Image (cartoon, helix red, strand yellow):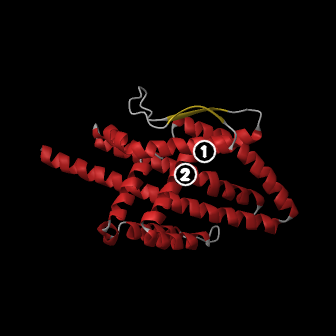
Amino acid sequence: MNFLSGFFTQLLFTAGIIFIFGWLISLLRRGFCNLMGRSGPVILLATGIIGTPIHELSHALMCLLFGHKITDIKLYNPKSEDGALGYVSHTYNKKNIYHQIGNFFVGVAPVLISGGVVILLLAILLPDAFDMIALEIKILCEAQVGAMPLAKFFTFIWASITAIFSAENFSDWQGWLFVILAFMISTHMEMSGSDIKSGLRGLAFITVIMFLIDGLIYLISPDAFHIVTDAIASCGFAIAAILSISVLFLLALLIIAILLRGIGMIFSR
């Protein structure tokens, strides 16, 4: 592995993974709303009672961690004129590199933190399913860069589906509560246009800093650079696995919307 391939591998398994899953979440959410028609906004209003505050609090948390000043915050506003159910307004010092880096984390916070909350709820409400999924994530993290066949990730997806949606889980209230909360959170993980712009601004600074640090490590020891790249890739596998759980719930919503649309077309004939 040469320097450039290792550097771009690190970018792919950090920011790349987050933006890819952010795009998937946005695509599935938009598809669900389009299929549901007039019912889509109503469903989003209902799920937003839980999902929107988590979305906005994730922005606020990153603002605090990276020294941004929060000037205004609205956790849930179903009567907003522009359709935005919530927002966080913040300012920062453009000359402060730490603040600029923070823009990335402020922008992608809903994807990362909401996905983390779903996993936390899984651990609390369905511990057996969590243990099974955690084991599969460990297997993914042990894979070497370039040596993980796509089939292994699909194996993880199938293991997650069987662990979460087993009939046994729905025999108790914990299983139903988890599914309901996961649906409500997942439908509001989408990054807005301003979130994406903020993320890209911060990513530019992160890319430059990462390039300089990687270059220094590679000059000192190419072997150490390879170890760092493998470690970052392992983290990327874990992030992808965690976020894929939320994607599964959005995919399930999309399938339900397709079925309902099909049934409606049959009875309308």
For the residue marked with disc 1, what is the amino acid? Leu
Figure quadrant of residue 98: top right
Which numbered marker is on residue 233?
none
For the point 42% across and 46% down, which residue is it? 50
Kindly indicate whether the residue at mark 2 contacts the one at mark 1 (C-beta within 8 angstroms).
yes
* Residue at the right extreme of this rendering: 220
Residue 31, position as x, y percentages in the image = 37, 45
**Residue 84, relative to residue 36: is it above or below?**
above
Neighbor class of circle 1 (other Cα within 10 Å; few <14, some 14-19, many 20+) is: some
Q: CA distance from mark 1 to mark 2?
A: 10 Å
Which element type, helix, strand or loop, lies under badge 2? helix
| Quadrant location of the N terminus in the rendered image | bottom right
Which element type, helix, strand or loop, lies under badge 1? helix
**Residue 135, relative to residue 264: is it above or below?**
below
Judging by the rendered image, the residue that carries numbered circle 1 is 61
| Quadrant location of the C terminus in the rendered image | top left
Neighbor class of circle 2 (other Cα within 10 Å; few <14, some 14-19, many 20+) is: many
**Residue 171, relative to residue 12: is it above or below?**
below
Residue nearest the viewer, comparing 15 with 171: 171
For the residue marked with disc 2, what is the amino acid? Ile
Judging by the rendered image, the residue that carries numbered circle 2 is 113
Residue nearest the viewer, comparing 208 with 42: 42
For the point 66% across and 38% down, which residue is it? 201
The reply, left or right, for residue 50 in relation to residue 91 is left
Report how many numbered discs are placed on residues in the image: 2
Residue 164, position as x, y percentages in the image = 39, 66
Residue 211, position as x, y percentages in the image = 77, 51
Figure quadrant of residue 94: top right
